[in-house]
Amino acid sequence: MSFGQLGYDVAHLLGGGVLLLSFVLLYQRRIGAVINAFATQGTLLALAAAWQAHAQGAPGLYLTAVLAFAAKGVLIPLALHAIVRRLNLHRSVETALGVGLSMTAGVALVGLSILVVLPATEGARALAREDVALALSVVLLGMLMMITRRNAISQVIGLLSLENGLILAAIGVAGMPLVVELSTAALVLMVAVVAGVFAFQIRERFDTLDTGSLEEHRGEGR
């Protein structure tokens, strides 16, 4: 596929949508809005996987699409909303960087992804090269979100968004074994479960999910 063909353009539209939602996650300051943006990103990821299944003639990717939609578009967002209601966290997300600096850093990371991926993948299919560049951008923006958020729930969402980038990269490379995608998803989801338990422990111990409060209690157990 090349520029101007339907398969190429739709793949780029969906991949670009996933990347755009990463910026929305960085921009949002309300926990509920962050969760909703993550659900939308998961739904776009599922659509991207389904389209790649059609374009590549790879039926296994339809399973990836169904799992991505069920987990990222529905189940995890519902679980996170339930946690927010249970812990009464209807408030703004505290950040280490302001909106302007976060968005500027995000744009810089996208530029870095392009500078790294495109020369390194010279000779590969144009669609695969650009999909990997988009995916790396999503991964780096997920890492940025984890670094710049002080709320444990938002950091978990950053981790899950990072994993969305890994899946986006896997589905964009023709011939990638389905077991690689599923094992990657399972690993990150397991880490997310551990992070969720950790968040509850922080809440019970310090009555807040602001990870910055841990600094105030460093060394108390010694």
Image: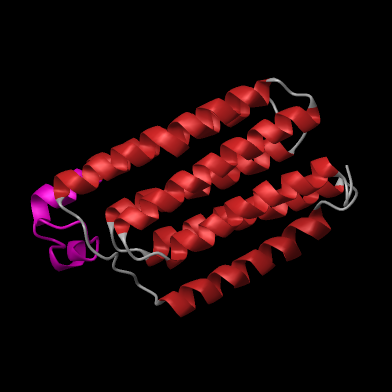
Q: Position of residue 67 (x, y in %)?
A: 51, 27
- Residue at (75% x, 37% y) in the render: 173
Q: Residue at x 33, y 69 (%)?
A: 95
Residue situated furthest top in the rendering: 59
Q: Is residue 98 above or below residue 207?
A: below
Magenta span of residues: 199-222
What is the x, y in percent for residue 75? 38, 33
- Name the residue nearer the viewer: 139 or 84: 84
Q: Is residue 112 visible?
A: yes
For this view, does 45 lie left or right of residue 221? right
Q: Quadrant of residue 106?
A: bottom right
Q: From the viewer's side, name the closer residue of 124 and 19.
A: 19
Magenta span has 210?
yes
Quadrant containing the N terminus is top right
Residue 175 visible in the snapshot: no
Report whether 112 appears left or right of 41: right
What's the residue at 73%, 50% (across, down)? 12
Where's the C terminus, which quadrant?
bottom left
On screen, residue 36 versus residue 129, left or right, reads left
Does residue 119 sit above or below 167 in this rendering? below
